[in-house]
Image (cartoon, rainbow, N blue to C red):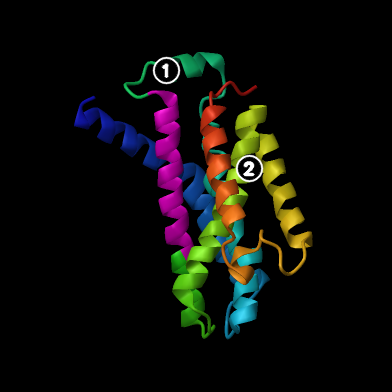
Amino acid sequence: MKTENFLTVLWVNVRMNYKNAFIPSILLLSVIPLIYGTANLDGIKSADCLERMVALVGIPMFTSLFCREQSHDLYGMVALRPLSFRVVAALRIGISMAGAFALVLVFAIYMRACGSIFPMGVYAVRAFAACMALGFAGLLCASVVKSTVAGYLGAFCYYFVVQAGTGDSMLKPVTNGIHPLLVLFICSAAAASLLFCKPSYR
């Protein structure tokens, strides 16, 4: 495949992510200071903010990645691309991962600038893990059920299960650290999403 074709596919998917994922995520982050408050937090409250609020960025960043081709006819057009759809899907996931990490890091920097005290690098990585777990739960549901609505529903169900869990839950990486089983879940959900990602949505 020519480099020009790959760059074209890359640019199209970056532009698609910008419209469908980055803008909703930025809007979500912009209202967090109004809802939760981000100034002068200690380590515990900072972790809670990142885990409860910032991790929600994973839902718009990942859940709807495969929603653009919502019919068999459109999928037939997608199948004519120089790259297979699974390669394009993996590319979209990679773009969203980079974008989600950048957004989490920028918000962590903002929290520090507002006087919150916490280990920024460690918490940013942990918040990114929480973001991916939440987003990949939604993406997996959307891929298996072939419905973006089901993906959002699955992501919110996962979120409420996490919030209802005990304080030492492995599903709370910012508070308790990144558990190996959480990493296994993230990797498995990503692999399964790619396996079931044929966009035959109805």
**Residue 170 x/y as whole percent:** 66, 61
Tell me the CA gap for discs 2 and 1. Answer: 24 Å
Q: Residues within 10 Å of mark 1 (few under 14, many from 20)?
A: some
Asked where in the image residue 94 lies, by quadrant, the reply is top left
In the image, what residue occupies the spot 65% across and 72% down?
A: 48
In the image, what residue occupies the spot 62% across and 51% down?
A: 134
Element assignment for label 1: loop
Span highlighted in magenta in the image: 84-104
**Residue 163 x/y as whole percent:** 74, 61
Magenta span includes 14:
no
Q: Quadrant of the C terminus?
A: top right
**Residue 11 x/y as whole percent:** 32, 38
Magenta span: chief secondary structure: helix
Asked where in the image residue 131 lies, by quadrant, the reply is bottom right
Which mark identifies residue 138?
2
**Left or right, residue 26 beside residue 141:** left
Q: Quadrant of the N terminus?
A: top left
In the image, what residue occupies the spot 57% across and 34% down?
A: 192
**Left or right, residue 51 beside residue 109:** right
Q: Which sits in the foreground, 93 or 12?
A: 93
Q: Earlier in the sequence, mark 2 or mark 1?
A: 1
Q: Amino acid at mark 2?
A: Gly
Q: Amino acid at mark 1?
A: Ala
Magenta span includes 92:
yes
**Residue 67 x/y as whole percent:** 55, 32
Q: Residues within 10 Å of mark 2 (few under 14, many from 20)?
A: many
Residue carrying label 1: 79
